[in-house]
Image (cartoon, rainbow, N blue to C red):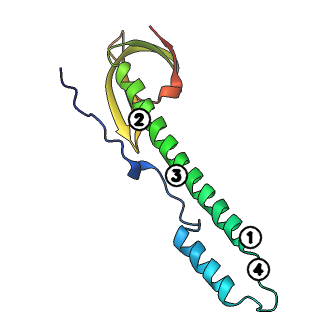
């Protein structure tokens, strides 16, 4: 049985930081530093290599964090899909609600559930963090 996608999760959903230096900017700073250094007191090559290695490590850590954020978004989406037609208890503004998960919506990459109570009322916009019990 084929399963089609119900909510797009992409790397574009991960916010990017615009105030961080990229590799190109770092190389420009390094080149400027080399251009204007005092010829009588040149900087050590090992220092430049260490700076480049630190920057590379920082960039890899940033990319890994972005990948983990994407993975967490996909995991919460998969978790939410598994709750369809399940009976759940939800802590909400009006107290504890018990009902069956009927629909699933995505906003900004985050899943929100709709629960139908035994009385037939629908409670909408329930986040996964509001669910206390799954039956």
- Asked if residue 39 can be seen in this view, the reply is yes
Question: Split into 4 quadrants, where in the image is the C terminus?
Answer: top left
Mark 4 nearby-residue class (10 Å; few <14, some 14–19, many ≥20): few
Task: Tell me the residue that label 4 is attached to.
Answer: 43
- Give the residue at the far right of this rendering: 41
Q: Earlier in the sequence, mark 4 or mark 2?
A: 4
**Residue at image x 38%, y 27%?**
78
State the CA–CA distance, disc 1 to disc 4: 7 Å
| Percent x, y of residue 113 | 38, 27
Q: Secondary structure at mark 1?
A: helix
Task: Tell me the residue that label 3 is attached to.
Answer: 63
**Residue at image x 63%, y 79%?**
29
State the CA–CA distance, disc 2 to disc 3: 17 Å
**Disc nearest the viewer among 4 and 2:** 4
Mark 2 nearby-residue class (10 Å; few <14, some 14–19, many ≥20): some
Task: Tell me the residue that label 2 is attached to.
Answer: 74
């Amino acid at each position: 049985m084929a399963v089609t996608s119900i909510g797009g999760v992409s790397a574009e959903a991960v916010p990017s930081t615009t105030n961080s230096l990229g590799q190109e900017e770092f190389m420009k700073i390094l080149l400027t530093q080399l251009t204007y250094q005092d010829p009588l007191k040149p900087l050590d090559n090992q220092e430049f290599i260490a700076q480049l290695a630190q920057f590379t490590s920082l960039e890899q850590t940033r990319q890994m964090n972005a990948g983990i954020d994407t993975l967490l978004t996909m995991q919460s989406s998969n978790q939410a899909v598994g709750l369809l037609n399940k009976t759940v208890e939800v802590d909400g503004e009006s107290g504890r609600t018990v009902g069956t998960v009927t629909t699933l919506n995505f906003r900004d990459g985050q899943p929100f559930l709709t629960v139908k109570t035994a009385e037939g009322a629908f409670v909408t916009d329930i986040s996964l963090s509001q669910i206390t019990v799954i039956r």
